[in-house]
Amino acid sequence: MLKYLRISNFALIDRLDLDFAPGFNLITGETGSGKSILVDSVSLLAGERASQEMIREGFEKARVEGVFSLEPEHPAWSFLEETGLDAEDGEIVIRREISRTGANRIFINGNLSTLGLLVRLGRLMADIHGQHDQQSLLRPRTHLRHLDGFGENGDLLDRVRQVYVDLEAVRRRLERLREGASRRLERMETLRFQRSELDQLSLEPGLDRKLERERDLLATAESRHQAAYESYRLLYDQESSVLSLMDQAHQRLHDLSRLDPDMESVAERSLDLRYQVEEVGLELRDYAASIQWDAARLDEVGERLSALEGLKRKYGPSLEEVLEHQARVEEELASVDLSRMREEELSREERDLESRYLSLSRKLSRKRRTDAQEFCRRVEEELSQLAMGGCVFRVRIETDESVQTGQGTDAAEFLISPNPGESPRPLGRTASGGELSRVTLALKSVVAFTPYSKTLVFDEVDAGIGGRVASTVGLKLARLARRDQVFCISHWPQLACHATRHLHVDKGIHQGRTVIKVRVLDADERVRELARMAAGDSLTETALRQARELLRRAAAGSGPGSRDDPPVPATQPG
C-alpha cells in the first residue's frame, strides 16, 4: 500500500505531507479544488510520464515522493532483486523530480533509475482507474485482458506469449535471409563464374614464374641443343676432343712420375680432371638429347601466361593477390551455402514453433469460451446491483489463426444490452457514460487481475450515476478495500459514507498565491462534509441529520467502512 506521500512545488501544491492507511481512502472537495492533483501525483509514482506543466509557477523543480509498504510475498520484491534495486527496511521509496530544464530524474530506493523500470514496478504496486480507463474499455483489444484475468489464464497466456515471441524472432531472421535471396542468387552466379575462371588455370604460388621459365626454355630449344651438342663433341666425341688430348697428357705425366716420383701427385690430379671432363661431356650429350622442340606446348604456355595476366588485371596486380581473391571466393560461396542451410533450418524451426503456438492458442481459446459463460453471468449479477437489472452482457470471441499475437488467435469484444428485449451490441456504441462507469466497476469487482494486493485509485468512478447507485458503488469499493488499498474521488455522500478514511481538499489564497491543502477529517468534520456534498453550502440540521444517518447505515452494513475502526493519524499539511 501507499504509506506516505510528500509533494513539493507540484501544480498548485507548495508542500504537502500525507500519511495513508489501508482500506478505503476517500478524497472530496469542491469542484476545481485540485483533487485530481493527488491522483496525478500517485500516477507519477506508478510510472506516468512527467510534464513541465506540472511544476508550480515560479519554481524550477517539482518533487513527488512516496513510500510503499508491501507484504513479504509481493512480486515487487523479486523485481527489485532482479534489477539490483535494494529494499529499505521492507519499504519501497520512489522519488520523481521534474525540472524545467528537462533533466527529470527518477529514484527507486535511492538509486537513479529509468522510466521503463518504474513503469514495470508501478504496474505491480498500483492501478490508476480514471476516465481514460473507461475510454480504454471502449477499445475491444483490451477486452481479452479482462476475460483472461477472470479465468486466471496467466500461466497459459505466458506460455502462448513466450512461444509467440520465439516464433516472431525466427520469422524476422527468416525475413532478413529471404530479403537478400535474390541478391545472393546473383552473387552466387558471379562467384561461381569467378571460381570456374580461376580453377581453369590450376593456380598455385609461383605459377607465373614457373610458366615464364618454361616459355623461355621452349623458345631457345634449338639454340640450346646446338650449344650443348657442340660442347659435347669438343669435350668428348671428336678425335681432337679435349678428352683425347687429356688422355695423351696424362700418359706423358705418368711417364714423368716414374722418372720423378715427386710428380706423381700432378699425374693423379690430371687423371681427376680427365674424369670430370668426361662427366661434363656425357651430361651435355644427355642434355642435348633431352631437348625437344614443341611449338604446341610453347603456344599453350603463352596462352596460360596471357590468361594469368588477365586475372592479375581483374583481381590483383600479383599472383599472390589473385590467390587471395580465389580463397575469398571459396569462403563466400561456402557462406552462401551455409545461409541456404540456415534458411532451411529456420523454416523447420518456424513450422515447429507455429505448431506449438497454434496448439497452445487453441487450448487457450477453448478455455476462454468456457470462462466467458461464467464471466458474463457474474458481470450481469454485479450490474444488477448497480441499478442495471435486466442488462444482458456478452463476450463475442472470434478466432482467426492467420492473425497471430502474443494473446493468441482470439479477438474478444464486450456486447451489452441495457434494455430488455434489445439484442446485445458493442459496448462502445451502446453504453452511456454512467453505464460505462458501472461496467468498469463491475469488471473490477469480478476480475482479480493479481493474487496480491495493490493500491487502486479511482478518479470519479461515480461519474454519470445517481445517489442510490453511488451507495452500491461505495459498498463495492469497500469490498475491494478488504484486500487492496483503495483511493477514490467522489461527489456523492452515499458513496463517501463507506470510506474508512476521509480526506478533504481545499483551495485557497496564501500570500497572494493559490495553494491547495489536504486534511484528514475527524468524525464531526466528516458529518459536515457529507452534509455539504448532499445539500451544498446550506448546512441545515436536516442535512446534518441525513449525513449522520448515512454514516450509521454504512457502519452497520460495511466492514471496511466501519467507523468503529480506530482513527489513523495523519501528518497535517503546512
Image (cartoon, grey):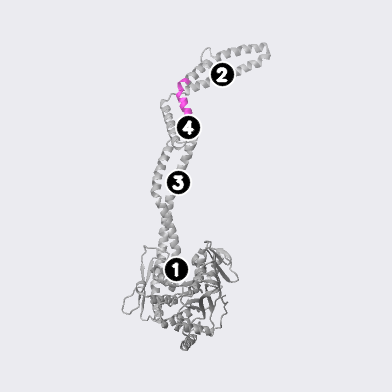
Q: Distance between the residues labelled 4 and 3?
A: 28 Å
The answer to whether 295 appears left or right of 118 in the picture is left
Across and down, in percent, residue 345 comes to 43, 54
**Is 48 displayed left or right of 419 in the figure?**
right
Is 227 situated above or below 37? above
Marker disc for residue 156: 1
Identify the mark nearer the N-term, 3 or 2: 2
The residue shown at (47%, 41%) is 327
Residue numbers of the magenta segment: 208-223
Question: What amino acid is labelled 2 in the image?
Answer: Val
- Secondary structure at numbered mark 3: helix
Q: Which of marks 3 and 1 is in front?
A: 1
Q: Is there a contact, CB below 8 Å, between mark 3 and mark 2?
A: no
CA gap, disc 3 and disc 2? 60 Å
Which residue carries the number 3 mark?
334
**Disc sitting over residue 432 in the figure:** none
Q: Residues within 10 Å of mark 3 (few under 14, many from 20)?
A: few
Q: How far apart are marks 4 and 2 (CA)?
A: 36 Å
Asked if residue 379 lies left or right of residue 20, the reply is: left
The answer to whether residue 363 is magenta is: no
Question: Which residue has dot 2 on it?
Answer: 277
Q: Mark 4 points at which residue?
A: 208
Q: What residue type is labelled 1?
A: Leu
State the SS at label 4: helix
